[in-house]
Image: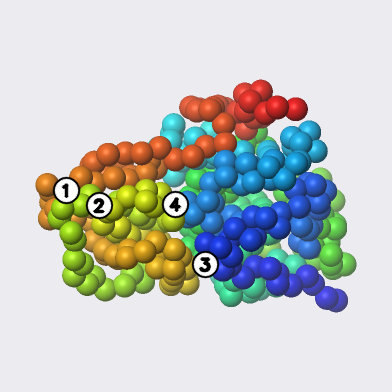
Amino acid sequence: MELFEEKNAIFPTFYDEILQRVRRIDPVKYSSTRNYINGSVTYLSPYISRGVISTKFILSEVLNRGYKPVQIEKFIQELAWRDYWQQLWIAKGDSINKDLKNKQTPVSNNSISKVIVEGKTNIIAVDKAIKQFYKTGYLHNHLRMYIASIACNVANSHWKVPAKWMYYHLRDADWASNALSWQWVAGANSNKKYIANQDNINKYCLTNQKNSFLDVSYEDLNKLEIPEIFKNTPIIELRTPLPKQKEIIINETLPICIYNFYNLDPLWKKNELANRVLLLEPSHFEQYPVSQKTIEFIINIAKKNIPNIKIYVGEFNILKATYNSIKIYYKEHPLNNHYQGIEEPREWMFDVKGYYTSFFSFWKKCKKQLKY
């Protein structure tokens, strides 16, 4: 049995190479094949999450190539999901770290099954994907849902720790998208849980596995007892290996532009003279830990695309106190609420802001701004 290899899940860090990836998007083929693991997906999520490019930029590039919204509505919807999750984070703040709409039930543990972490669930497509995940930092969206469903709805783990485990290894780590999607699968942010049986996995992952614990009807899957192999749920430690702090030199006659895990936009204030600082706050990464490969990824993007950027490992308030007389600019984000200085907006696809109880109520407003 041969499974699809994620050959495209190698992520360049030069801006020009990222733009080439944008130009290669086939939004029509994406719409018809995206659910399959060999589908025509964009592999742009790490750059959207890191703020290198925006959803608005991607949409503009695609429309400028002559596509009409009616042809590519599914593609636009999937971009809009990212903005929707972010708007939900802005509106709800730290509340997204708890069961948002419903209490997840049943819950047997607050960790994650060892066999999921080790890629030994005995579901061939899932195990192969987890092993590739550790190498590439990428998971197809359907695999994310399958893993979340197994963790929350088969092993009955509360969603929070498994979501943090996945976030830790994702190149496109976006806490809003990740946490709220896990809650959606677990029924904590949706009216029903998401479950998938072996037939569904076989269809979209191009496998033909039989006789697994998921090889049952959906009715029987709802009554499934926790398989024995999922009952071992040890505590896992997720720590961010930040580089050691080195002294940085700041030109005190120029303002400071703050870049961070969610803002690595190489075009931001590009033509203005400024000190450019990549801020890596230990407190941020203690709450939202990521892997060494992810840290290396963001540092490479910053160094290759933002001239003369300096890396500051420390807290914002210490940086601010050290250079108290200097103007500080930063981009809006829910995790930047403690910053002080001049806040600038992010780019959004649509002028639709605030809390919506469902994506489709949000999308209904967005759709009105498209010219069909």
Q: Is residue 39 visible?
A: yes
Q: Is residue 371 left or right of residue 265?
A: right
Whichever of callouts 2 and 4 sits on the residue coming sooner in the sequence is 2
| Earlier sequence position, callout 2 versus callout 1 | 2
Question: Residue at 32% of width from left, 45% of height from top?
Answer: 330
The answer to the question of whether label 2 and label 1 lie on touching residues, with beta carbons closer than 8 A, is yes
Give the labeled residue for mark 3: 13
Q: Secondary structure at mark 1?
A: loop
Rendered image: mark on residue 267: 4
Residue indicated by mark 2 = 256
Q: Tell me what residue is drawn at x 28 percent, y 53 percent.
A: 273
User: Label 1 crowding class (10 Å Cα cut-off): few <14, some 14-19, many 20+?
Assistant: some
The answer for how far apart the CA atoms under marks 2 and 4 are is: 15 Å
Callout 2 amino acid:
Ile
Q: Residues within 10 Å of mark 4 (few under 14, many from 20)?
A: few
Q: Earlier in the sequence, mark 3 or mark 4?
A: 3
Residue 35: percent from left, percent from top: 77, 52
Q: Which residue is mark 1?
A: 326
Q: Give me the C-alpha separation between circle 3 and circle 4.
A: 15 Å
- Spot occupied by residue 223 in the image (x, y as percentages of width and height): 74, 48
Sequence-wise first label, 2 or 3: 3
Q: CA distance from mark 2 to mark 1?
A: 7 Å
Badge number at residue 12 = none
Mark 2 falls on what kind of element?
A: strand
In this rendering, does residue 113 appear at all?
no
